[in-house]
């Protein structure tokens, strides 16, 4: 099967093929590319342009291992999650099987990725410290990071693995007050292909004037 792992400057290619990469090559990522990816993140909009964010980059092998080990322990002590993954691996649906095999692999070998990016909400202030409003001022930066990485031929995984280790990350990354990790993004050269991604057809999720009113696309 043809390999689809190189970068692209075409915005539409990047948008349509940016997908969750859960297998990484050990090759180091040049520093300049890490800067570029994060800089693209910082070009994202935020409420009143407050840019309530900081991005912690982890490359040190021991630091990555410590986080990876925490993820393994977290997963091993969550029977519900293990059962969910097992069920997915036995699904009749090939995409679900591949995804859950990938999830199991990344949980087992998170530190196979040479870089972790941990975006943090920082000094988000009022009105919304938590929830959708606060998230809306950082997840666009996260998406920019994913797409920019895709453009550079780097694989990423948008994960919420940070959620179960917020306390540890706060200590290990020496996060100041009012600083919350909102994602854990492993990044590296992909050992799996980029998309095309599988998504619902746009006609199914687009509602014209009122919910449920469809239109034919010409
Ligand atoms: C909010 C959010 C949380 C996610 N959390 C995880 C996660 O914790 N672990 C994981 O392996 N993938 C995670 N993903 C990746 C999704 O599973 C993946 O993007 C989705 O299944 C679509 O697959 P594709 O990107 O390969 O097309 C997350 C994605 C989003 C947007």
Image (cartoon, grey):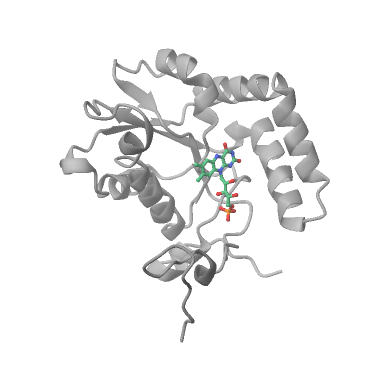
User: Residue farthest to the left?
Assistant: 48
Q: Residue at x 61, y 45 (%)?
A: 22
Q: Quadrant of residue 178?
A: top left
Please indicate whether residue 133 sits to the left or right of residue 216 in the image: left
Rendered location of residue 134, percent (x, y): 31, 34
**Where 40 sits versus 200, above or below?**
above
Q: Is residue 32 visible?
A: no
Give the residue displayed 54% in from the left and 67% down from the top.
204
Task: Looking at the picture, tell me which residue is in the foreground, 142 or 8.
Answer: 142
Question: Which is more toward the observer, 161 or 124?
Answer: 124
Residue found at x 25% / y 49% = 43
Residue 31: give x, y in percent of width and height. 37, 42
Residue 218 in sight from this viewpoint: yes
Image-quarter location of ligand 1: top right
Q: Relative to residue 11, is residue 5 drawn left or right?
A: right
Q: Give residue 21's position: percent from left, percent from top.
A: 58, 49
Q: Is residue 193 left or right of residue 7?
A: right
Q: Position of residue 82 (x, y in %)?
A: 74, 30
Along the line of sight, which residue is nearer the eye, 148 or 124? Answer: 124
Residue in view at x 18 percent, y 37 percent: 50
Viewer-side residue, 191 vs 145: 145
Residue at the bottom extreme? Answer: 218
């Amino acid at each position: 099967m043809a390999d689809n792992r190189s970068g692209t400057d075409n915005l539409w290619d990047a948008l349509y093929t940016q997908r969750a990469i859960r297998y990484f090559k050990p090759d180091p990522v040049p520093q300049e590319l890490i800067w570029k990816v994060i800089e693209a993140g910082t070009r994202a909009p935020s409420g009143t342009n407050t840019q309530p964010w900081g991005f912690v980059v982890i490359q040190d092998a021991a630091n990555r291992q410590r986080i990876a080990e925490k993820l393994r322990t977290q997963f091993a002590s969550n029977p519900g999650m293990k059962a969910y993954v097992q069920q997915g691996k036995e699904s009749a649906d090939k995409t679900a099987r591949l995804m859950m095999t990938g999830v199991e692999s990344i949980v087992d070998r998170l530190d196979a990725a040479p870089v972790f990016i941990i975006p943090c909400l920082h000094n988000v202030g009022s009105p919304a410290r938590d929830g959708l409003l606060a998230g809306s001022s950082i997840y666009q930066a996260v998406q920019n990071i994913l797409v920019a990485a895709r453009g550079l031929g780097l694989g990423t995984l948008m994960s919420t693995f940070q959620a179960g280790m917020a306390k540890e990350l706060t200590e290990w990354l020496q996060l100041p007050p009012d600083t919350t990790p909102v994602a854990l993004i492993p990044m590296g050269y992909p050992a799996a292909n980029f998309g095309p991604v599988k998504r619902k057809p746009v006609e199914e999720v687009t509602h014209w004037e009122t919910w449920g009113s469809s239109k034919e696309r010409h």
